[in-house]
Structures are given as C-alpha cells and as structure tokens.
Image (cartoon, helix red, strand yellow):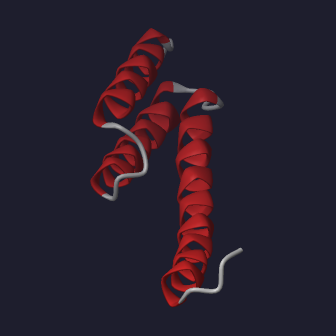
Amino acid sequence: MQRHKSVEKRVRTSKKANVTNRANKTRVKKAVRGVLEAKDKGSAASALKTAVSVLDKSVKIGLIHKNKAANQKSRLSKLVNKIEK
C-alpha cells in the first residue's frame, strides 16, 4: 500500500463503510426472512410492512438499487397474498 494521506484516509473510510454496509445488508436479509418464515397471514402482513420499510431505507442510503427493492417487495407481497387465512 502506498503511503499517501489520501490512500490512508480512503482505507479508513472504506473500513467504516464496510462495517455499516454489512450491518445494513444483514438487517435487510433478516427482514425478508421474517416474511418468508411467517406462518399465518397476520404475522406475514406485519413482517411484510417492516420488510418494505427496511428495503426502502436501504434504497435511500444507496445500499441496493431501487429496482431490486421493488422486485423483492413485489415477490414478498405475492407470497403474503397466497397465504391462507
């Protein structure tokens, strides 16, 4: 690694961003998994609401692309609608 101030700062900031991004990606995965593992319609609907919120926030901070979030929200809502009461 080169010994320039800008390179050293870039290493520091990228490490910090890596920690933040990993935490947020885990948050998204857990929210989606909560919808997939829901047993009844009510719990699935509430899990979907939180998952949509988490996906929208991840788009806002630039973690995932808006079309990917839209595809995931659509897929999850189809799944929730298929669940029997």
- Front in this rendered view, residue 6 or 65: 6
> Where residue 18 appears, x then y in whole percent?
60, 65
**Which of the 4 image quadrants contains residue 73?**
top left
- Rendered view: 54 above or below 23: above
Frontmost residue, 46 versus 8: 8
76 w.r.t. 82: above or below: below
State the image coordinates of residue 84 (x, y, percent, origin top left): 50, 12
> On the rendered image, what quadrant is the N terminus found in?
bottom right
Viewer-side residue, 79 vs 83: 79
Question: Measured along the vertical axis of the image, is residue 25 above or below residue 49?
Answer: below
Whole-percent x and y of residue 50? Answer: 41, 48
The location of residue 37, given as percent across then percent down, is 65, 31
Count of marks, rendered view = 0
Residue 30, above or below 67: below
> Residue lying farthest right?
1
Image point 33% across, 59% down: which residue?
61
Q: Residue furthest bottom?
A: 5
| In this rendering, position of residue 21 left or right of residue 55 | right
What residue is at 43 percent from the left and 18 percent from the top? Answer: 75
Residue at point 46%, 9% (across, down): 82
Please name the residue shown 37% across and 34% down the image. 69
